[in-house]
Amino acid sequence: MSTLAEPHLEPQETTIVPPSGWFALDLAPTWEYRQLLFFLTWRDLKVRYKQTALGAGWAILQPLLATIIFTVFFGRVAHLSSEGVPYVIFAFAGTLPWTYFANAMTNGSNSLVAAASMITKVYFPRMALPISAVFGCAVDFLCAAVLLIPLMAWYGEAPTWRLLALPAFFLLATGAALGMALFLSALNVSYRDVKYVIPFLTQMWMFATPVVYSAANLKQPWRTLYGLNPMVGVVEGFRWAIIGTGPAPGLTTLASVGTTVVLLIGGAAYLRHVDQSMADVI
Amino acid sequence: MSQYAIKVSDLSKRYIIGNTTSSYGTLAETIVSVVKTRGSRPERREMWAVRDVSFEIPPGETVGFIGRNGAGKSTILKILSRITKPTSGEASLRGRVGALLEVGTGFHGELTGRENVYMNGALLGLTRSEIDARFDDIVAFAEVEEFLDTPVKRYSSGMMVRLAFSVAAHLEPEILLVDEVLAVGDLAFQRKCLGKITEVASAGRTVLFVSHNMAIIQALCTRGIYLNHGGVHTDGPIDHAVGAYLRSLEQQSEALDLSLRTDRRGLGEIRVSEIAIRSPSDASGTLTTGRPAEFVFKLTGVMNAITITFVIYDQLGHPVTKVSSAQPAPQDIWEAQDEPHFECLVEALAIVPGRYRLDYTLSSGVGDQDHLEGAAYFDVVEGIVGGRPVSMGEWGGDLVLTTRWRGPTAGVS
């Protein structure tokens, strides 16, 4: 027998009806299961770094190694412009959010298919899976972001008040990654092609984003149009906040925010649509 | 207004079975099929897993769902637990719903027992404080205190099942849906689980229970719903429903009419007219792992040197074993019969529980006379081989060996 003093609530009534085409986002169940989000995120992290020799060190190494490679090839060999700051810190300010975005999109996209056995056996808001996958990568990002401190100290970049804007750009990157993850994970349920498309998508997207190069000289209206790639707003925002290069956030950033909102709403709506038959298809 | 815990009206669920082998497509397949559809309709078969099912369950009633595999029992539970959506109809549930459709869903081998309890609890809809409050009960019930901080990949399967059941059993929902989960674990623990379910039921909660074990169903439930081909066949007092089910099973195992089959191959001078697959030791005819089974093939006639060979396939279509009368042995009995038939007694059906298909080939000296694929389907339920309970073969193939161990420590189960 339970000794719990359970609050006596009105009996909740659940009505189960057939699927009805596209319908409202209905985010309430996901909110109700927010603790599941926490546990899923934590499980992702724990399982990811278990039985790896370096553990969470990989979270730091990934953007660091990318930065070193980019510095050697694009900075030293190809002599790409870094807007007057050391190429290392220029590249790190780009690879830090980019690694986060790319990993979050990739892990998020596989999250539903990887949990197929759970989806067919137990009810829970499916949206929790891509969301928690993105959150797990966000924790990695926070670990890697700590590297900023020694890097900025070494290259004598004094922190400014602009650094306070960093969380906002982090949120923007999270939104963009989540929007893509929601959409691609749902698409992956019916079309396993997604798995093969993602590496190419990530690679092309990186070249379309000023991670290794500077897009500061781009003229209007192309600048704003370029901002429709949400990662343009993110990477330029990171550079501006960390080292003060490039244009201050403006129309380009707004365009990125706009795309991100569209991605989030569209991704969530598509996932909810797929959700209706997910357990039968996956 | 009537008081109900669960009300189901005209519930139907249709599955589309395409002729592609995979259930999910690739983009290319979809494009190809869209292009093809312009000319002709693609070959798709519909299957109604549940058709026009209606019932109402008052709060506090314990209801058993019975029927053959594929009768729609599990689909109804999946709809009620919101895993899948119905194709038409409606269901209403009053109160918090807890579903235990498969033990151990969401368990991760790398996480410790303690971590999995929290993870699993959250998955089943408990909040952290609710899990905290139940934690000691859950662990005590599962009897895994010493192993709480060991990754569950090091657990024996018995320990894993106990912990998983324990989490779900402590959900304390107003409506509990249980699907054939008690088949796992040893007998002592099965009894403990049953006790827990009885406790839940007597606390005034509504329980929906699916099992192939009629003894458990009859002990636990007051009302039975016998489903057949997706529809309600009998809905009434549990003994009534179980009786109806067992009678239909007998009829089924007595005769499988093969005369309507047009997909036979072979010379056709003599044929198999009827196949019966039954258990000689069980009145209901239900085949049980580790128990004897009898395969009877009635023939339309006799010829010189006829032999019969049948192959059993599992649900994945993998052959399990080939059985043939072509190689005689001393224990065989060959004699003249009034009604010619081959009778094959399997002393112990050492295959895991599940659904199987049977193909046969009837041959005479001049060649194959009659060959039929998918001639019969039969279900095998959980049983015991060599003193060890055998449950659904999720990981390890179809065969069960009788074994004797010697080693430093006994397993915990």
Image (cartoon, coloured by chain):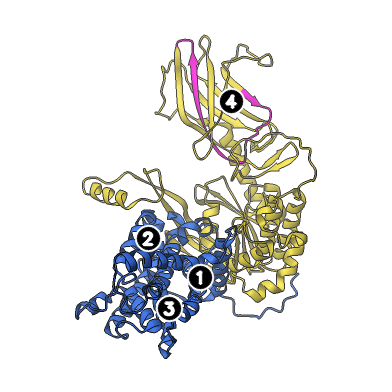
Q: Chain of mark 2?
A: A
Q: Quick check: B344 left or right of A260?
A: right
Q: Which chain appears blue?
A: A
Binning the other alpha carbons within 10 Å of mark 4 as few (below 14), some (14 to 19) or many (20 upward) gives some
Q: Quick check: B240 left or right of A166?
A: right
- Element marked by disc 2: helix
Q: Chain of mark 4?
A: B
> Where residue B220 sits: x, y (%)?
70, 56
Q: Chain of mark 3?
A: A
Q: Does residue B48 lie above or below A15 as drawn?
A: above
Distance from the alpha carbon under mark 3 to that under mark 4: 71 Å
Q: Which mark is residue A140?
A: 1
> Where residue B143 sits: x, y (%)?
77, 59
Q: Which residue is mark 4?
A: B296
Assess whether mark 1 and mark 2 are in contact (beta carbons under 8 angstroms): no
Binning the other alpha carbons within 10 Å of mark 1 as few (below 14), some (14 to 19) or many (20 upward) gives many
Please state which of the two labelled residues, at mark 2 or mark 3, is closer to the viewer.
3
Please name the amino acid that badge 2 sits on.
Leu
**Which residue is pictured at 46% across the width and 17% down the height?**
B270
Q: Which residue is mark 3?
A: A170
Please name the amino acid that badge 1 sits on.
Asp
Please state which of the two labelled residues, at mark 2 or mark 1, is closer to the viewer.
1
Q: Are marks 2 and 1 on the same chain?
A: yes
